[in-house]
Image (spheres, helix red, strand yellow):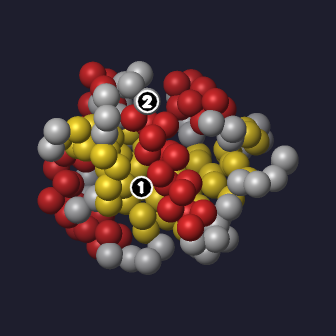
Amino acid sequence: MSVEIRRMRSDDYAEVAGIWMRSGLPYQPRGRDSEERVREQLGKDSSIYLVAEDRGKVVGVVLVTHDLRKGWLNRLAVPPEEQGKGIAKELVSRAEQELSARGINIFAVQVHEHNHRSRKLFAELGYQEHHDIVYCSKRHGSEE
């Protein structure tokens, strides 16, 4: 499968919300995941919202934010029927590239302890768990 990774557009919201629900992410449509909140964030310099698209259909999403020092990969999701095809890895790779281009070389995610699939994915990509808070980070260009 060859997917295109591109910036999320406001008209992608319905597909993105559908992916969050189908993939089992805790979806909060009245809070942080509301359409209004997501649309507001799309225009911010600190937000890099990415989708994977295959033949005009959104098949993955990651919401990336940063504080000019550390980048956070949030809400990474691929629908069940598309999982196992490398889409999540492509999204993470592109997120890291976008952050590195801004001089940000610390990449972090927060993963629920019970989410073994995501923990395995990030471990395979070089992220290290911090067991006291199940916090995962990757420092690009360092051995730590």
Pick the residue in front: 5 or 132.
Answer: 5
Q: Is residue 73 visible?
A: yes
Q: Which disc, if any, is residue 71?
A: none
Location of residue 39 with respect to 3 vertically, above or below: below
User: Does 73 sit left or right of 48 as displayed?
Assistant: right
Q: Secondary structure at mark 1?
A: strand
Secondary structure type for disc 2: loop
Which amino acid lies under the numbered mark 1 shown in the image of this protein?
A: Leu
Give the residue drawn at x 43%, y 30%. 86
Identify the residue position indicated by label 1 in the image. Answer: 63
What whole-number distance in Å separates the C-alpha atoms at marks 1 and 2?
A: 17 Å
Compared to residue 42, the image places residue 132 above or below, namely: above
Residue at the spot 52% in from the left edge and 25% down from the top edge: 117
Residue plotted at (68% across, 61% down): 105
Q: Residues within 10 Å of mark 2 (few under 14, many from 20)?
A: few
Give the image location of residue 56, x and y in percent: 15, 44
Q: What's the residue at 21%, 54% (across, down)?
A: 13
Q: Which sits in the foreground, 58 or 22?
A: 58
The single residue placed furthest to the right in the displayed view is 143
Image quarter where the N terminus lies is: top left
Sequence order check, earlier mark of 1 and 2: 1
In terms of image quadrants, where is residue 141?
bottom right
Which image quadrant for residue 3? top left
Amino acid under label 2? Gly
**Residue 19 seen from this side:** no
What residue does disc 2 label? 86
Identify whether 91 is placed above or below 113. below
